[in-house]
């Protein structure tokens, strides 16, 4: 009987904590994770925080701090300046897809599309998802690749997939 009570208590705790987590928007999830501090800074500089706290759903391919470190520091600093808000917003909205696309959806799409799926980003450009070397990658408009290193981080208004390189639009 004690085991049954313990199991029920653990199950209820997990259910309640998952429901509490699901109440956070994708922005809240990013703000709560130190690996996304540069992304959060960029979202604020581009004035996109409010837009990504909207109802959605959104799928965000979120670059880590290490992904942003691959960009020349002078270029990154320049992008964060107020005068470059439009250019930064274009880059960041290239990381966002309208809809809730899970890893399972991506894998199914890759099978159906012979290893290629094209997704239209919020900035209007196409991101290509490809499977190569037994990994799943994003291919940007410039032909550069970013590995999807974690998937299905859920928020109340969408899902985050973590990437290791900032993807760039045309």
Image (cartoon, grey):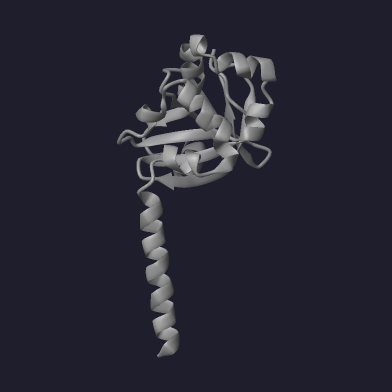
- Identify the image quadrant of the N terminus: bottom left
- Identify the image quadrant of the C terminus: top right
Foreground residue among 130 and 22: 22
Q: How many marks?
A: 0
Q: Is residue 109 visible?
A: yes
Report x, y in % for residue 149: 61, 42
Report x, y in % for residue 25: 38, 41
Q: Is residue 3 above or below residue 14?
A: below
Q: Is residue 113 visible?
A: no
Furthest residue toward left: 55
Report x, y in % for residue 135: 63, 40
Q: Is residue 6 left or right of residue 114?
A: left
Residue located 38% across and 50% down the image = 22
Q: Is residue 94 above or below residue 155?
A: above
Report x, y in % for residue 17: 41, 60
Foreground residue among 87 and 114: 87
Quadrant of res 100: top left
Q: Is residue 81 left or right of residue 119?
A: right
Quadrant of res 56: top left
Residue located 34% across and 37% down the image = 57
Foreground residue among 141 and 131: 141
């Amino acid at each position: 009987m004690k085991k049954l009570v313990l199991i029920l208590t653990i199950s209820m705790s997990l259910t309640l904590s998952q429901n509490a987590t699901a109440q956070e928007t994708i922005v809240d999830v990013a703000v709560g994770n130190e690996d996304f501090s540069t992304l959060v800074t960029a979202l604020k500089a581009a004035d996109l925080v409010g837009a990504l706290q909207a109802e959605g759903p959104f799928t965000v391919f979120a670059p880590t701090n290490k992904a942003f470190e691959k960009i020349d520091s002078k270029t990154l600093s320049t992008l964060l300046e107020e005068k470059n808000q439009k250019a930064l917003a274009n880059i960041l909205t290239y990381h966002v897809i309208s809809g809730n696309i899970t890893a399972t959806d991506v894998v199914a799409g890759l099978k159906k599309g012979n290893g290629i799926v094209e997704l239209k980003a919020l900035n209007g450009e196409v991101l290509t998802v490809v499977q190569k070397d037994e990994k799943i990658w994003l291919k940007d408009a410039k032909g550069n690749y970013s590995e999807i290193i974690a998937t299905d981080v859920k928020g109340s208004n969408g899902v985050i997939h973590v990437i290791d390189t900032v993807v760039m639009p045309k």
